[in-house]
Image (cartoon, rainbow, N blue to C red):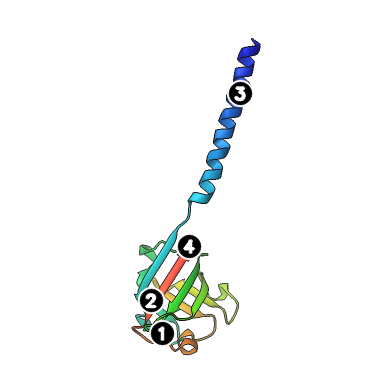
Amino acid sequence: MKQKRMFAVIALCSISMLILAGCQAKKGVTQTRVKYKTQITSIDSYGNAIIGAIEKEKTALQVGDTLTVSFGDNGPTEQLTCKLVVNYDDVPVGEYLARFDNDDGQLKIAINEGSIAEKHQLKEGMTAQIDMAR
């Protein structure tokens, strides 16, 4: 009887350790990386850069993601960091943001209550690179 009880305890401990080891392994495995190299398709009347090749329904980007964005055709440029948000006021005034337009679903890179095009001399047709790791 003692041998059966001892075997049950050992089996239970072994199963518990396997379950815990499996949970630990899963934590580090789930990482999503998204990288886009595209163009600014237009600048709207507020000075926001529209990145038309990235549409809400066709992307892995999600609200809350932190994006690293760079613009320019001639070598490395300054990298901007912004959150993907629903509304402009989801970030403080003067902060960078990215959001999908409610009307056409295109991605906009912007400054809350500012002109990103003016601040960074952005123009239609410029290269835009967007990176995200989650």
- Pinpoint residue 111: horizontal percent, then vertical percent: 52, 81
Residue 10: numbered disc: 3
Residue 133: numbered disc: 4
Horizontally, residue 132 falls left or right of residue 11, namely: left
Horizontally, residue 11 falls left or right of residue 121, namely: right
- Residue 102 visible in the current orientation: no
Q: Nearer the viewer, mark 4 or mark 2?
A: 4
Q: Is residue 82 above or below residue 18?
A: below
Question: Mark 1: which amino acid?
Answer: Asp
Indicate which disc, 1 or 2, sits on the residue closer to the N terminus.
1
Report which quarter residue 71 is drawn in: bottom left
Question: Mark 4: which amino acid?
Answer: Ala
Task: Provide the residue designation for mark 2.
Answer: 51
Question: Dot 4: few (<14), some (14–19), or many (≥20) neighbours within 10 Å?
Answer: few
Q: Secondary structure at mark 4?
A: strand
User: Where does the N terminus fall, quadrant-wise?
Assistant: top right
- Pinpoint residue 37: horizontal percent, then vertical percent: 36, 72
Q: Residue furthest top?
A: 1
Q: Secondary structure at mark 1?
A: loop
